[in-house]
Each structure stands twice: as C-alpha cells, then as structure tokens.
Amino acid sequence: MKHYDAIIIGAGQAGVPLAKKLALAGKKTALIEKRLVGGTCINDGCTPTKAMIASAKMAYLAGKSSELGVETGKVKVDFKKIIQRKNNIVKQFRTSTAEGIEKTKGLKLYMGEARFSTEKEVTIAMSNGKEEVITADWIFINTGAKTLIPEIDGIKETGFLTSTTILDLDKVPEHLVIVGGNYIGLEFGQMFSRFGSKVTILEKSETILAKEDKDVSEMLTGILTAEHIDVLTGVEIRKVKSHKKEELEIEIKSGKSVKRIKASHILIAAGRIPQTENLGLANCGVKKDEKGYIVVNNKLETNIKGIYALGDVKGGPAFTHIAYNDYTIVYRNLIEGSDYSITDRPLPYCMFTDPQLGRIGISEKEAKAQKLNYKVAVLPMSLVARGIETNETKGMMKAVVDADTRKILGAAILASEGGEIMSVLQMAMEGGITYDNIRYCVFAHPTYSESFNNLFMKMED
C-alpha cells in the first residue's frame, strides 16, 4: 500500500492543474483517471464541439456570402474532414495535457477506476486488470457528470445518442431529433442543421432556455426557426420505437394532441447527473444530496475532513471555468494559507449557438423574484453599428441594473461574440462601475462594446 500526501480522482479541468500544482509545491500526489486525461471538456465537451461549431458557422456564412456581395457557388460540407479536424484538435489538447502530467515531478498517474475502501483509502481497478490500493491525507473528487437518460418508453432499445457518442458519427444525420431545448441541445441542433440535417428540438418546458428571460428565449427561438429548425415546446415524449430499418418513431403529446415524428437519430440532451455511483462513498462517509451530488461547504470540503469535491460532481453551475476556479480556491487555501470561498463568486457562461448567448449575474425575472428595485435596458443588434457593418444583426444586448446604486446586476448578450461582449460587463461588475460610467465611457469605434453607450442611454434617470 502506497501513501500519498494527496489523491485526485478524475483528470478533468480541476483535477489536472491541482495535481500538478500540488506536486510542484512538494506534495507527493496521485492522479487517477478511468478513461482519458483532460476530462469532458477536452474529450467530449468544449473542445470538440466548438471546433465543429466553427465548421458549421463557416458553412452557414459561405451559404449567405452573397448578402455581402461575394459569390461562392454551392456550399459542400465534407463531414469526414470536419470530424478529422475535430479529432486532431482533441488529440493535440489531450497529448499536451498528458505530457504536462508526465513531466511533473512528484506526480503519479494511475489509469483505472477509483473506489473508496475506507475514509482515506482508495482502491484502483487498473486498466491493465490489476488492483492498486493507495492512501492519502487529502483526497479531491473531480469525477464530473454524465448524460441523464430520462424514463421514456422504448428509449434504451433504440440506440440513442448522447453528447459524447454523437461526436463519433461518420455521416450527417438525415433527421436528428433532440430531447432537450437547453444549452447542449441547442448547440448541437444548430450545428447539425447547418451541416444539412433536418433538426427537431423537443422541450418539455413552455420555452427553450427555461431559466433565461422570456424575451431572450423567444428571440433565439425565432433565430433558430428562421434556419428551418423545428422547435416544439411544452411537449411530453411518450414513446420511442424502431419503425423501419434505420428509422425511429417518436410519439409526443402537446396538450391534448398526440403526434408521431419519424427520425434517423435521437440525441438525449435533457440534463446531466453526477458520476458518484461507483465511488464507494458509503465506505468513506461522504454525504450526497438527493440527486447524487456530493455536498460541500463554501471551501469545497465535504463532511469528511480532508476530502474535497470539485467541478460538476458537487452540483451547482456545471461549467469548465467553474471547475478550474474550484481548483484555484482549494489550492490557495491549502497551500498558500488563503481564505477563499465559492460564495458570491461571479458565474459567467456562454452558449455557443450563433449568435452566442453570453450571461453574467442575475436575469430580469430573478431581479423581479427578489423584489429588487431594478431597471432594464435592451438594445437590438439590428441597431448596433458593428453588427450592421458585419451583417451580424441577430439578437440583442440586455442589462439589468440596480436603480438605487446604478450598478449592473446582470446581462444577457445574444450577439455575435456575445461571450466576449458579456465579459466587458462582467469586468465592470467586478469593479463596481455604474452604468453612468459606461454610457459616457470612450470605447474604440467601431466595436461591439461601443454600443454599451447606446444601451445605457436607454436608461431613464
């Protein structure tokens, strides 16, 4: 039995940098990964999907280039080349991650599945068929989450796709039905529509992006339907079955109406669940909530002293950048003696549809629910000079501000480069800058951020 100062379970976007930094700080460290180093982000999430989205956008722009006076002829999508490019980028990122781990002195990588034997003891079922038992004073759980498969009659017999397996397709689906009208489903839906698939999105809520403001959701719905994507909301999926060879039939109910949709593929994108079921948490006493997420305090420590959980496995916002920030918090607290907390940290995120949706802070409906004294400013992208010049006029800028302090409470930027534009307002929020400062600020012309002048001019004093 080998003893380490620290064990990290899961080589994701919190696990890898934490393992390297702990080792460099002189801690004897073990990193355990059951599948691929880099976690979901590099292998099945951000990296591959954003690489493919870039190809989808290029196909879309080429198809409408005549609007800018450029004739390209018929646009042809080489899907195999798109997949190869995606695979090459993933391999590059994964190789770089593996090399970084290998070069770090004091860091040992175990390829296998970890399970707690006792409170501070972990048994590893190695990929080579052997077993290793290791112990540590600190243990960090970074096992992430996986696709939630809803209870739908017949779904398990139909060869459904997940956000992982859809990346392995070798041809564009003829008709892709997507279960779930949120961030993952919408990105894949628009992407495959632009590659040439017929796409139908099924959402049980009354709107897509149910957590966002209604005007944001409605505007994106209009954008997607204009691209001939069928968006069906308020629907219940009753049954899925194989109808003919390589054809699926999905029975849905909306109100009192029942209809059947034929499809070639079905993608499940209706949520995610934590990967905690095989960790043996009962053996170490770590508590989970009713959904299986590990319960942590504001320093990311579980109920067992010295055992921490980072990233998606602990619940809360499931974003790569949050997992990375988790690592910086525990590292600085444990090694540098800081007192950082996850309480009140900024929670920016971006959905990479086209236009992107960049979000920071609270929405209008959250401000209303909290009974805040707030004001709202909205500027359609059709009135943004930079958008008009670049033919990117879809979407809007929306900001929620405190009517008393005049500080920004939140923003939704549905625009080309919406994530980058949102980040400007995030920095303003971090610095406590008021909307008065922004509306009279000198921005470079012509940029998207310059339109914050016009956005905040809409505020009534």
Image: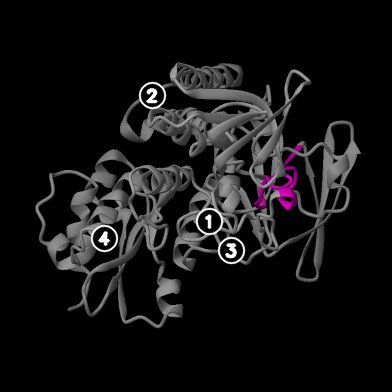
Callout 2: helix, strand or loop?
Answer: loop
Mark 1 or mark 3: which comes first in sequence? 3
Q: Name the kind of residue labelled 2 in the image.
A: Glu
Q: Is residue 338 placed above or below 4 in the rendered structure?
A: below
Residue 23 within the magenta-colored segment of the rendering: no
In the picture of the structure, the residue carrying the numbered disc 2 is 71
Mark 4 or mark 2: which comes first in sequence? 2
Find residue 199 and report its horizontal and vertical position in percent: 65, 43
Residue 221 tag number: 1
Image position of 244 (left or right of 103): right
How busy is the neighbourhood of tag 2: few (under 14 within 10 Å), some, or many (20 plus)?
few
Determine the CA span between mark 3 and mark 2. Answer: 37 Å
- Is disc 4 in contact with disc 2, using a CB cutoff of under 8 Å? no
In the picture of the structure, the residue carrying the numbered disc 3 is 207
Q: Which residues are magenta?
A: 265-283
Q: Nearer the viewer, mark 2 or mark 1?
A: 1
Q: Residue at x 80, y 66 (%)?
A: 257
Q: Residue at x 35, y 57 (%)?
A: 396
Find residue 283 and report its horizontal and vertical position in percent: 74, 49
- Is disc 1 in contact with disc 3, using a CB cutoff of under 8 Å? yes
Callout 3: helix, strand or loop?
Answer: loop
Q: Nearer the viewer, mark 3 or mark 4?
A: 4
In the picture of the structure, the residue carrying the numbered disc 4 is 429
